[in-house]
Image (cartoon, rainbow, N blue to C red):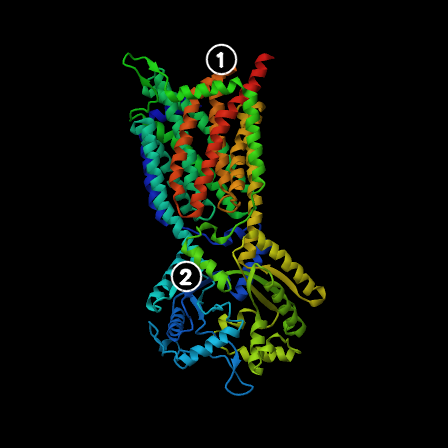
Amino acid sequence: MFRILADFILHYRVTLLASVAILFVASSALLPSLQFDFTPQQLFRSSHDDDRNAVYRESFAARFGREDNLIAVLVDGPDIFRPDVLATLRDLTFDLRYLEHIKDAQSVATVAIPRPGSEPGAMTVDPIVGDLLAGAGHDGLSRPVRGPPVEAALAEKLAELAGGEPLIAGRLASADRQTSLVLAWIGDEVQDINVLKAVVGALKESLTLYPLPEGYTYRVSGIPALRVEIVDNLRREQLTFIPMTGFVYLLVLLFLFRRPSGVLLPLGTVAFAVTATMAIMVLTDFPINIINNILPPLIFIIGISDSIHMLTRQAEEIEHGMSPIEATRSMIRHAGGACLLTTTTTAVGFLSLISADTEILKNFGWQAGLGVMLAYAGTLFFLPAALTYMRPARRVKFSATGDRQTPLLEKFLTGTGSSLLDRPWTVLTVSLLIALGFGVMGTRVNIDTTILEVFHESHPAHIATRHIEEKLGGILPVEISLEAKEFDHFKDPELVAKIYALQRFAQAKSEVLSTESFVDYHQATRAALLADPAERTRMPDSREQVEQLHLLLADAPDTQSGVGRFVTGDFRNVRVLLRVGDVGARRQLRLGDELNAELARLFGPESGVTYFLTGDAYVASAALNSFIHDLFYSLLMAIVVIFLMLTLVFRSIKLGLISLLPNSIPLIMTFGYMGIMGIDLNTSTVIIFAISLGIAVDDSIHFFARFKEEMAKTDDTREAILATYFGAGRAILLTSVMLLVGLIVLVMSDFMPTRQFAILTGITIFGAILADLFLLPVLLYLVYRREERS
């Protein structure tokens, strides 16, 4: 087949080059339309329409709003209750309510909290520093908003209220009076990252209109801001480090092959594959997300490897006296088949992910499979066609008399191979012990993830979020939904007391930073009416009291950020909001188990109440746990499929079995390194194992294919293996070294996923070198030598 294909490629090379050029230009034109979507909800989406967590989360958000759309502006300074600071925060808060897609904003200067009125038995909920919209409405204000100065007496009165009011203290203002939050709720309909970026950008522009006094600072945090920061970082990384890495690879290829054909053609091949894959994603309306953002480096690594194997084979044939055209023909016939096998097995491995339950993983499977096949198409059609118009790469030097000299690298490889084959059992034993050691270290790896893991500890987003967690109520939501079939069911004072008990239980947990429910607002109202803070802990005695307390709050300002966010009008559904620290998925799931146990105790079947845990922090943790197990099972299936394919293609179950250990060692080494360094298995690191499998399979198949070719020429297993070292070993080693050099550039990144990708992929490549050039030859020698003796 490849003989006919070689004739076709060489005969129609002009047409093929023109076609590739047209496709490349057309694909490049589509790249500006490529979308980015880093919403955590992607991990929640299952291929099953009845996925309970995801479905319920969306219906719950429709009733009470989305807590993942909350932007938190952190304000730091010596005293946030200084009159001029409060005036600035008040004006800023009202200004934010003007912004498109902002449905509400709140700060310590505008919050409407029940408090005693001026007369005995009276209560007021008006903001202490004044309502700028009173009697005016939004049309009566202009930007920038400039309200009247705040009197010192009012500022001190607000500080006194905040110090003893749980709805403010530790939520909107810190106990030391040095930190405060301005909260802005984005409309629930806004999920597109570009719209979120525009909203966050507009908010930051608003901050410039309301400068704080010297010594005070603004910092923007919250889940929308973090999502925008992550996407901006990723885009910046792609625009910065991918070109830098490409330039480094260009220099390395130039050093290795010394001719333009050895530099431009491999880079052109992978550039075509990456661009075409991204263009297809645009046409199929699939964005770059938290999983498939590794597609460009993945396609590059696999595609560049096949290109180097092809070039090396052509150079070898020229060394044996063939003309460049005939050498290219022979390259297609021999290396083209091996590259097809590596591509097919790798693609099938990725396509096996289609069996996964997680939608994002299924999509990554076909996208990665398509990408590696496009890389092979470029390697098979573009590279040989273009090579006929360029001087071929050379890998050996000739003396002045024309005698060939074996290059130093080939001498090193064959010498090393000979030494290994002299002591095969020692090599096998050491390899197994190393694999066992890394495997033991791998048992220390935890399955865990945090939202801040993508940032270095010195990153402003990391610092701001941790600061909010230390001094205020945090930004990550865990939400508890309590439902009943009967109208006004939660007006039952016994149930009100149980909700209060649930909050106290949750507040005692180290993961929980704050809790909030309609009970907090009712009890604040009770304490304000009776002018007695002690009344806050006393629960209502009757349904009538619950109704009266709720009616008193019905017309309060800021209702969008008040009691209306925690109970439906028919009192059939109650929301309890917990703000938790970014403590990781494992602790979030443990907290969920403890909450479920307490909910079962408080709200038994006789209560008429059903409960459900939801909210991004909890649902994302549960989804991650499912996602990682899903991926591991899919990778296991991929290994089995690859084993079966190798067995069928090489028509040898021995080669299939031999392939298992070398193809597993890079994964084991990477896993062990993660255990040694304390790196968690999360959405950023788990997908690297897909690359590990691709790298290991790619190199081992090239070694297998060349070994089978050499075995057809000789009955001596040792001679065949050493010839394989000479023929395929160079390409395997040079490809690996080149990729390692390029990954060094990525280690300089401040974006933790990029840095971890570089380090862990480097470990994988190093493991593949050891497995394919040290262990695999020894396994082949031991198995086939035994046959020789028998």
* Residue occupied by mark 1: 714
Q: How many marks?
A: 2
Instruction: Give the quadrant of the C terminus.
Output: top right
Name the residue type under label 2. Answer: Val
Mark 1 or mark 2: whose residue is earlier in sequence: 2
Q: Residue furthest bottom?
A: 119
Between marks 1 and 2, how big is the CA–CA gap?
70 Å
610 vs 329, nearest the viewer: 610
Going 46% across and 75% down the picture, which residue do you hit? 159
- To which quarter of the image does residue 593 belong? bottom right
Given this view, does label 1 or label 2 mark the residue nearer the observer? 2
Residue 306 is situated, as x and y percent measured from the top left of the image, at: 41, 30
410 vs 268, nearest the viewer: 410
| 740 up-or-down from 311: above or below | below
Residue 529 is situated, as x and y percent measured from the top left of the image, at: 56, 82
* Residue occupied by mark 2: 220
